Structure formats: C-alpha cells, structure tokens
Image: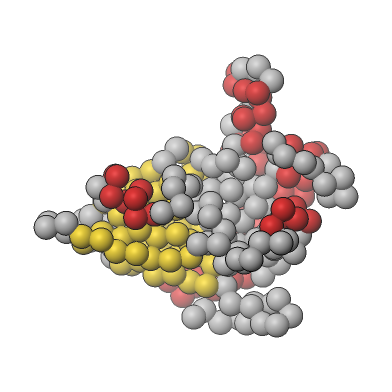
Amino acid sequence: MNNRILIISDLHIPYHHKDAFDFLRAVKKEYKPDRVINIGDLLDFHAINMHTHDPDLYSPGHELQISKQYVKELESIFPEVTEIDSNHSSMVFRRAVKYGMSREFLKDYGDFLGTKHWKWTDDLTLTMGNGQRCFFTHGRSADILKVSQTMGMSAVQGHYHTKFLVAWWANPDNLFFGMNVGCLINQKSMAFGYAKNFRTRFILGCAVILDGIPKLLPLVLNKKGDWIKKIV
C-alpha cells in the first residue's frame, strides 16, 4: 500500500475544468494508484464564501445540488478517497462557527454529499512505498520546501493554483522533496473573477508518487482550452 499514490487538488466543483474527470480517468488507467488523496478544495462553495458572491452564479442550494452530481461521478471513478481538510471545502463548518452554530447541528461531509467510502481528515502523514514518510496538507506556506523542512519529511500541498513544482533538499541522512500539485479548475469561470488580472496563470494538473518518487502530471490544453487527450 502507498506504492502508487495519486494526489488531486483544487477541483473547486462545480467550477472545475470540463475535461478534469476525463483526465483523471486516464491518469487512473495509466498509473493504477493504490491510494487516492484529494488534498483539498474539492468543492468551491462560492455561494457561501467569505468574499463577494457573484449573483449570476448558483445559489447555495443549487450549487450544492449540482456539486453532488459531480461528486457522484467522481466517486464512480475513485470509490475510495482520503479528503484533506481545506479552506473552501470546510466552508460550511467555517460559516457555522462564524455565526455561533455548534457542529452538533451539522452533518458530516460524507453524509450530505452521499459518498460511501470517502474519508475526511486533517493534515495526513503516510509512509510511502520506499519506507520514507510524506506529509500531505492543503496549504501551509507558499514555499513548500519550508513546509517539508519544518516537518522533517517530504511534503505535498495544493491551494496555490499557480504553483506546480517539485523541489528537493537533503540532510546527511536522507533526500526529501516538496511538491505543489496545481489545480483542476476552469479559470474562465466567474467564480475565479478575482484572478482575471493576475499576471501569473493557474496551472492545471495532478501528481503521483511512485515508490517514493514524485511525478507531476500537467493537464495540457490546446488553444481552444480543451485537454489534448494525452498524459505527458
């Protein structure tokens, strides 16, 4: 177990890229992961976020209804997923705390999304196929090497949509990596209007860790914004 780990990040359902699921199906077929980690922001919850809600997008109820349909499709691809807690996907609980509502009034995410074998957890540490440990978090620092060095092990994170990289460091005893895994969103969606004037663009993709070795898998688009139907 943990010999072939797939890491998915920042789908922001229902505002994900239209080819994201087909891309993930192809990745699953190519790499046959024995563990799947969604490292955060599975859902966007734009309608109840802490910032301005675009009135031309879904209402809270409609957004959840549409999102649940996509989650069901994703569950058909990956029946077992470990979901890492994150700022967007935990929006319901964050809103509840803001307005003084006890968690006793709220359902778990698996209950209201209808998933059967997905597990939600805080930051996660796993032993990889090569015997070394790796720390998985949604987003601790823009500098993933700092996260890795602070934890004293390899580290993976999402959250930073413009970062898609693997960096290495070493001490006298071992070699470690830090990896940012990008996102799988539709940047043209009005949900990401805040980024329309960014000079840097979001990078689409996911990653695998094969026997302890990280590998980034970009979702490469053509000029029309469609996936090229090839894993590179």
Report the residue that reaches farthest toward the left.
172
- Give the mark count: 0
Does the rendering let one see residue 76? no
**Residue 128 in the image: above or below residue 219:** above
Residue 124 sits in quarter: top left
Seen at 71% across and 61% down, the residue is 197
Residue 149 screen position, x and y as percent:
28, 50
Which residue: 59% across, 32% down?
A: 108
Taking the image as shown, residue 193 lies to the left or right of residue 175, namely right
Compared with 215, 67 (above or below) is: above
Q: Position of residue 216 (x, y in %)?
A: 44, 69
Q: Position of residue 207 (x, y in %)?
A: 45, 65
Classify residue 213 by image quadrant: bottom left
Q: On the rendered structure, is 80 left or right of 73? A: left
From the top left corner, tell me how far across and down residue 98 is, in percent.
65, 23
- Viewer can see residue 66: yes
Question: Residue at 66% across / 61% down in the picture?
Answer: 198
In the depicted structure, whether residue 141 falls above or below residue 104: below
Q: Residue at x 16, y 56 (%)?
A: 171
Quarter holding the N terminus is bottom left
- In this view of the protein, which residue sits in the foreground, 118 or 197? 197
Q: With respect to residue 68, does 15 lie above or below?
A: below
Here the colouring is secondary structure
